[in-house]
Amino acid sequence: MMMKVFVAAALAVATLAASVQGQAPAPSPAGLPKYPLMQPALPYPYSAQEPLIDNTTQMLHWSKHLATYYENVNKAIMPFPALQVLTVEQMMPAAGTSAVPMNISKAVRNNAGGVYNHLLFFKILMPATAATNASNNSMLPQQVGQAINQTFGNYTVFKKNFTEAALSVFGSGWAWLTVAKNGSLAIETTPNQDNPLMVGAGYSGNQPILGIDVWEHAYYLKRQNRRPEYIMAWWYVVNWPQVNMNYMAATSGNKTMITSYASS
Ligand SMILES: *[C@@H]1O[C@H](CO)[C@@H](O)[C@H](O)[C@H]1NC(C)=O
Ligand SMILES: *[C@@H]1O[C@H](CO)[C@@H](O)[C@H](O)[C@H]1NC(C)=O
Ligand SMILES: *[C@@H]1O[C@H](CO)[C@@H](O)[C@H](O)[C@H]1NC(C)=O
Ligand SMILES: *[C@@H]1O[C@H](CO)[C@@H](O)[C@H](O)[C@H]1NC(C)=O
Ligand SMILES: *[C@@H]1O[C@H](CO)[C@@H](O)[C@H](O)[C@H]1NC(C)=O
Ligand SMILES: *[C@@H]1O[C@H](CO)[C@@H](O)[C@H](O)[C@H]1NC(C)=O
Ligand SMILES: *[C@@H]1O[C@H](CO)[C@@H](O)[C@H](O)[C@H]1NC(C)=O
Ligand SMILES: *[C@@H]1O[C@H](CO)[C@@H](O)[C@H](O)[C@H]1NC(C)=O
Ligand SMILES: *[C@@H]1O[C@H](CO)[C@@H](O)[C@H](O)[C@H]1NC(C)=O
Ligand SMILES: [Fe+2]
């Protein structure tokens, strides 16, 4: 046991040193602490959403912005072994509770939130295809499609409401489609890198299954201040089969898969 902890600590230090030097650190063997949290590989090229979301924006967004959230959350929890065994899903709602020391509570909230939110954001994107264009016209997978019909009447109403929510975010933040404990859907918005799973601030505790990042870094390079144009383009590259899987995960229990990537 002591040996295991020692090996893990040595590994953590070694991998952190490696990542400081810009090399890809080796993943933690199963069963050892999660520290440092490691950014997975993006399962599609940065250009996959061209021309709707451009290559350079996706490259900067994934390899700089998201990487910085990883770096900063790892830095914040470096002095706290008790936090280093947590997954980001566990750590994020702990910020603001006594589980996270006060002097890093803001850093954990913003950066663990940033990690979680971006993993979800990139996971539900795909290239624009005939299928995504069809889903733009309401051909959604069965389960989430029915749930959308039940809550909003039809896809058109849902899309309009969600778009309005995303437009209404003041400054930087997110709009979400979430699943409540009883399985019903809701549209919610959060500021900064918050999300509905966070503790406090009147958040629902609902599980997000679809989210759009409306920070300017998500669209400014190609579209400057034209957030409405970015949102319309984004609808064409939403991976509805993945959102459907997220919906089923949210209603049937395995929420881990919503932000997991094959390489992590
Ligand atoms: C996307 O950007 C990367 C790195 O910036 C570049 O190497 C690649 O050629 C670009 N691909 C396309 C399809 O534009
Ligand atoms: C928070 O406090 C710990 C000691 O309890 C210290 O090691 C760490 O550097 C502090 N972090 C910040 C961001 O002040
Ligand atoms: C889907 O629609 C987008 C936006 O109009 C367009 O750029 C793209 O070429 C279309 N793709 C297919 C396969 O129809
Ligand atoms: C996508 O949906 C919008 C309405 O929400 C419609 O105006 C547009 O023609 C649709 N585009 C495609 C390629 O089906
Ligand atoms: C949702 O309702 C529309 C009619 O408004 C219907 O065409 C569509 O098939 C329904 N979707 C599902 C998955 O039941
Ligand atoms: C959708 O938006 C309309 C108009 O803003 C509102 O009346 C309605 O309650 C919203 N529906 C849902 C399910 O959020
Ligand atoms: C969706 O529902 C709204 C409100 O009931 C209705 O006005 C609209 O015609 C419906 N659209 C479709 C495509 O069914
Ligand atoms: C499900 O729960 C939400 C609150 O989380 C509530 O607003 C909604 O009315 C409930 N729906 C049903 C069908 O019970
Ligand atoms: C939940 O999903 C994750 C990722 O897909 C998987 O690794 C894990 O084994 C699943 N857990 C259960 C209990 O099915
Ligand atoms: Fe972002």
Image (tube, rainbow, N blue to C red):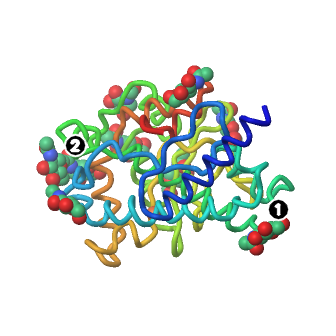
Q: Residue furthest front?
A: 3
| Mark 1: C-beta under 8 Å from nearest atom of ligand 2 | yes
Q: Amino acid at mark 2?
A: Asn
Does the image show residue 196?
A: yes
Answer with left or right where residue 164 lies relative to residue 115: left
Identify whether 74 is placed above or below 32.
below
- Percent of width and height locating residue 23: 42, 57
The residue beneath circle 1 is 101
- Taking 232 as reference, is 211 left or right? right
Task: Estimate the x, y position of residue 180 in percent, counting from the top left.
Answer: 64, 38
Image quadrant in which the N terminus is located:
top right
* Quarter holding ligand 7: top left
Asked whether mark 2 and ligand 3 are closer than 8 Å, the reply comes as: yes
Q: Nearer the viewer, residue 23 or 257?
A: 23
- The residue most toward the bottom is 225
Q: Considering only order in the chain, which callout, 2 or 1, is on the residue closer to the N terminus?
A: 1
Name the residue at 51% across, 41% down: 27
